[in-house]
Image: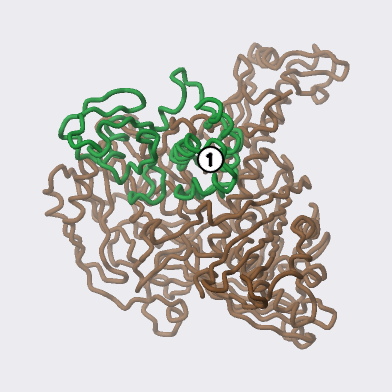
Amino acid sequence: MKTAAPPLLIVNGRSLRIPARDRRKNLLTFLREDLDLTGAKRGCGIGVCGACTILADNKPVRACRTLVADVLGHSLTTIEGLAAPDGGLHPLQQAFIDAGAIQCGYCTPGMILTAHAFLLKHPEPSRAEARRAISANLCRCTGYQQTIDAIMAAAPHYKIKE
Amino acid sequence: MDELKDKAWRNDAAAKVTGRTRFADDIKQPGMLHAVPVYGDFVHAKLLAVETAAAAKSRGVVRVITARDVPGSNRGGQILKDVHVLADDKIRYHGDVAAVVVAETRAQAIAAAKRVRVRAEPLPEILDPEAALAPGAVLIHEEHGTNLIHRHVIRRGDADRGFAESAHVVEQEFRTPFVEHAYLEPEAALCLVRADGVVEVRGSMQHPYSTRRFVAEFLGLPLARIEVVGTPMGGGFGGKDDTAALVCARTALAAWLTGRPVKMTYDREWSMRESYKRHPYCMRYRMGVGTDGLIRAVQCRIVADGGAYCSTSPWVTWRSTVQCCGPYVVPHVDGEVLSVYTNHVFTGAMRGFGSPQVNFAVEQLVEIAAAAAGLSGVEFRRRNMVRQGSTTVTGQVLEGHAVSMSEVFERVLAESGYEDKLRRSSRGRGEDDYYGIGLAMSYRGVSLGAEGTDVCAAVVSVQFDGSVLLEAGIHENGQGAESAMILLLAEELGVDRSRIVYRRPSTSAVPDSGTTVASRATIMGGGAVSRAAAAVRLQMAGAVAADLGCRPEEVRFAGGRLTAPGGRDVGFAEAAQRLYRDQKYPYALGVFPAPRVDWDESCGQGRAYFTWVYGCQAVELSVSRRTGRIRLLNAWAAHDIGRAVNRAALLGQFYGGMAMGAGYGLFEEVAMTGGRLRSLNYDTYRIPRSTDLPDMTAIVLENRDPLSPSGAKSIGEPANELMAPAIANAYFHATGRRRCRLPIGGEK
């Protein structure tokens, strides 16, 4: 990270100027309370469960263990920013639906973003690699099987388009 | 007709993948305050004072609430009203809430909570159920007169005679630990007092009607003055019943006293500390087997640690009583199941509800007995399992539905290649890592059974344009209950599911339909939907039958049309409009009362459940010789669920249940020291990660149940109650060592 980070934060493509008083804020609280981006969830508050996962420059970040200052100058993607501007679902989101990977939905935003970052780097994963990719995102409902199905089903799209 | 048929569908999926779903903590209200709980650092103590002055003067604090501020009854509970919603006379466990701090911001409330001082005089801590039962033991609830919460017995035949007739008698003790539900979303509630004087409660809960009772009694208001609307729930697994209701009650009081909307969202640490767990069991079993390999007798004494409050202990242990011998025919049974107060965190409903514990014991016990009788576990099970017309250990004849125990068992044997893999299991021999396969099977009474009143309501209202509103008295816990109801109704009315909108029910709109636990959503909610749909069909058919030239009952509903036997038809919307013009409504309240059950508590005999589900699971694993680490390699599950309503959601229950069962078997345990939890977050309480699990195979059997209006039965809990004993049996086949204490991975 640069020494003097510019006071800009890009959130889902939108540039925000961050006043000094907000830079010491917890990133998850800032997203949820100040920006009303409530897709990222607080599950544990200690960076273990992954429900607060967002992407900074397409790399997974645990928002609950991050300060706003730590991501200044970076481009953040939250779950609200993954679909197309017209609201059309991202193929990975559609794959989660089609594979039945959705139950309570609390881990889902973090799970999808983790999978998205993984597929951007590994568009042709094996099932075992997909399984490892989500090992730091806890889900109590699904047993992960349909989640892995969804990642495998969405993978071809990453090879062609992204 | 539907090209997406083999793809999964849920009414709430698009909102969940885009982050639009608003869980309780995602909702805000103008002028909203924030509340947090305050605990005293005591396990058992006489409360002297809750000193709030310093906290009340803290920045941003609007109010500090203690038991003195409760306008109604400070006692809550579903069976015994023994919960002191805010501590008044004593602290009974480390998670008792002594005060609630209400402030302008959450940070201010948390800061002020540290300045509340709970003064109390320690009392002897009772942490062992047997010690709690000893004569002269200090009482945790003096007015209850004993630390015994409840004792169920089961007496069938003559156990002494049964053991006398036995050629082989085996005995074993089994123990299971406290287990945390670990729903990803901690408890949260948002309450406000509306201008009409109604207290509106939103929160993460699976029993809105019970929550309504808790809130009403706590505030001293009639039920009609409380409106509970569940929010989308971030997991429950039985755990968002009592604790969720208590959180709602305290939040409602804060709103009542301040006149402003109040939100209370739990941290994980508070949730783990305060919320109830799955009961730890100590189970002593004895089984006698005749020379013919048939079970003659079972004797068991089961003691459950109920912790500080009764909660649902009598119901949980009742299911354990009914299912204490597993799915086997046993002519002579003598058993007792006790639940006992201690100063541990209280215990209550958790997915399985008293079955995971006894299954862990019984499914190992039958293999121990089989070995004593010189039989394989497979052969022993074939000889002893329940079949069509069998009589259960409570004297219930299994009839009126397909008793498919054998079918699920044989399917798992075949699909897993069980007997071949069993022959290849290492049994502690060889140079490489140990390898083994194991299985477990169960039958499970569906819904509540003789536990309590079991009825469910649903409202179907066809609109003027042919769109349909549906409400049912069951709750979406994340399992897909709403979607299942929509799919059932679409089929019943012969319309596309896109016409139907599921309206999240409020307790003020749909009659009390009980709790969404006991795997009862699909069978009970589905039953009510079927009944409502049948009534609406009759109304609509009645309006158009004359024109169609047939009798109302001959009208067929399909493809969005009402069709007479001769082929004349009318559109669904047009039929609805006809009814409206006749000054009638295509509207019905459907009620499904569970079919008759009966129970004699004095001897533990009766028709316990109106129908049963049958399941079998197997698992293949390796055990490192060096580290003892267990790796699951493959897993199979076969369940007869009556009928698959929503296939992908059904499979989700299979996999999720197996995963949770695997965690129970391998490593889950709430660690405690002297009644204080050491497991307070996911770093100290481990739940299965993706890499802890193998690929799983689901085998779906569908024998439609005649007693279920929709034909469907249950899957949520059946899927969760077998993996731990299957792992234990596989571990034995791999290493030659029996593990009679859960978790297995924790015992090297």
- Tell me, yes or no, if residue B706 can be seen here: no
- The structure residue drawn at horizontal position 34% and vertical position 39%, both measured from the top left corner, is B191
User: From the image, which quarter does the N terminus of chain A lie in?
Assistant: top left
Picture layout, residue B135 above or below residue B636: below
Q: Which residue is mark 1?
A: B476
The residue depicted at 59 percent of the width and 75 percent of the height is B739
Q: Colour of chain B?
A: brown
Q: How many marks?
A: 1
- Asked if residue B102 lies left or right of residue B268, the reply is left
Residue at (38% x, 31% y) in the render? A77
Which x, y percent locates residue B374? 79, 81
Label 1: chain?
B
Q: Is residue A24 above or below residue A45?
A: above
Examine the rendered structure and indicate whether residue B148 appears above or below residue B208: below
Q: Residue at x 76, y 15 (%)?
A: B544
User: Can residue B230 be seen from the camera position used here?
Assistant: yes
- Image height check: is B152 above or below B614? below
Tell me how the rendering is colored: by chain
Name the tint of chain A in the rendering.
green
- Judging depth in this view, the residue of A52 and B174 nearest the camera is A52
Residue type indicated by callout 1: Glu
Within the image, what quadrant is residue B569 found in?
top right
Q: Position of residue B303 (x, y in %)?
A: 53, 74
In the rendered image, residue B416, in percent from the top left (x then y), is placed at: 74, 58
The answer to which quarter of the image holds residue B709 is: top right
Disc 1: CA contacts within 10 A as few (<14), some (14-19) or many (>=20): many
Which element type, helix, strand or loop, lies under badge 1? loop
Foreground pick, B7 / B228: B7
Q: Nearer the viewer, residue B218 or A44?
A: A44
